Amino acid sequence: MRRAAALGPGLVALCAVLAVVAFLSVTLGSRDIGLSEVLHALRSWDDDGSISGTVTLELRVPRTLLGILVGAALGVAGVILQGVTRNPLADAGIMGINSGAAAFVVVAITVLGLRGVGVYVWFAFAGAIVALILVYAIASFGREGATPVKLALAGAAVTAGLASVTSGIVMTNVDALNELRFWQVGSLAGRYAPILTGVAPFLLLGLAASLGFGRALNGLALGEDVARGLGQHIGRTRVAAFAVVAVLAGAATAACGPIVFVGLVVPHLARFICGPDYRWILPYSMLLAPIVLLLADLLGRVAARPDEVQVGVVLGVVCAPAFVAIVRYARLSEV
């Protein structure tokens, strides 16, 4: 009860911070638009053909909403992956999600001759899911099943294999190289309402399902033997967790490309704030991650006016030293 009384207000405070950051994301950007014009567009919710109305309603609002959903999805997926594998460095990149998505995007370009972010979303989504299934299937071989060590090794092997295949294809195909380079940078720019509405149901479903994993992840954190003693079925838990991660990280990566560091850093930041209880780490990560992602996106838009720096680049610059600090001052063994 004391812990809930202490941490509950923190969630409320984070909701308020997220609302403020989302408002800033809609009102600020690489193009100078007056606050009154932005507020008018938001109040009327009608694109009257003006530049301010078009930029606000067709670009910034979908971009902000997608940033909230993708950030929350990546943060929660990172928590679940680190909890299930008991690996403090587990994220979508290590578990083959990014490489699987990239491989399928390359197939769409080179084999099917398809173009456009709206088309890549579904191929990247399928590739991410297939890669995760492949990782789990490989790790499941043997008497012990999919242990944390085997999952990490299988993820590294699948990532390396798919990345090599993808590199081999794009090096001999200029069109594939150019298109993949645009998608792989990791960005919220150019992701319009159709992409948001296409991935939103998957992200919302995955986020809702993820909140039920707190108790199971707490059991796994105590060790597999203890978890089994508490009546937990380890195999079913891992399959369900990987299914949720496939939906969350797969849809997020498909929509915005491989955005790094959010799923890696945010779970440790949440753990530093609220302790080792996954019932609190999950909702804290769900709120902290979109705050981090939107702030990085906003920084990239404002710092390089009238151009912008993609959010994947900003996160790499900002979060790398932050992660070093976390490694220095927090105990990564507490996963």
Image (cartoon, helix red, strand yellow):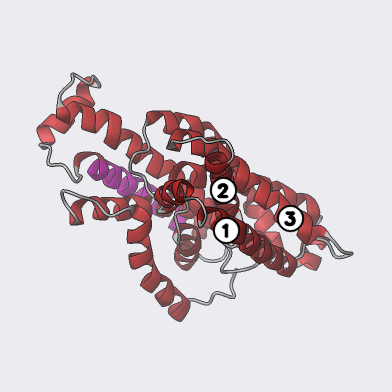
Q: Measured from the top left, where is residue 179 in percent x and y?
A: 43, 46
Q: Quadrant of residue 332?
A: bottom right
* Magenta stretch encompasses residue 314: no
Image height of 330 relative to 305, above or below: below
Can residue 278 be seen here? The reply is no
Nearer-N-terminus badge (3/1): 3
Going from the N terminus, do you reach mark 2 or mark 1 first?
Answer: 2
Location of residue 193 in the rendering, given as x and y in whole percent from the top left corner: 38, 30
Q: Earlier in the sequence, mark 2 or mark 3?
A: 2
Q: Are marks 3 and 1 in contact (CB under 8 Å)?
A: no
- Estimate how packed mark 1 is, as few (under 14), some (14 to 19) or many (20 or more) residues with alpha carbons within 10 Å: few
In space, the residues marked 2 and 1 are separated at their CA atoms by 16 Å
Residue 157 visible (yes or no): yes
Q: Main secondary structure of the magenta part?
A: helix
Left or right placement of residue 67 versus residue 157 in this view: left
Q: Give the residue at mark 2.
A: 101
Q: Residue at x 47, y 53 (%)?
A: 258
Q: Is residue 36 left or right of residue 126?
A: left
Q: Which residues are magenta?
A: 6-25
Q: Which residue is mark 1?
A: 168
* Amino acid type of the residue tagged 3 in the rendering: Tyr
Which numbered tag is attached to residue 205?
none
Q: Quadrant of residue 47?
A: top left
Furthest-right residue in view?
Answer: 143
Kind of residue sitting beneath label 2: Ala
- Where 227 falls versus 33 (above or below)? below
Q: Is the C terminus in the top left, top right, bottom left or bottom right quadrant?
A: bottom right
Which residue carries the number 3 mark? 136
In three-dimensional space, the C-alpha distance between marks 3 and 1, rounded to whole angstroms, equals 25 Å
Residue 206 in percent (x, y) is at: 58, 41
State the SS at label 2.
Answer: helix
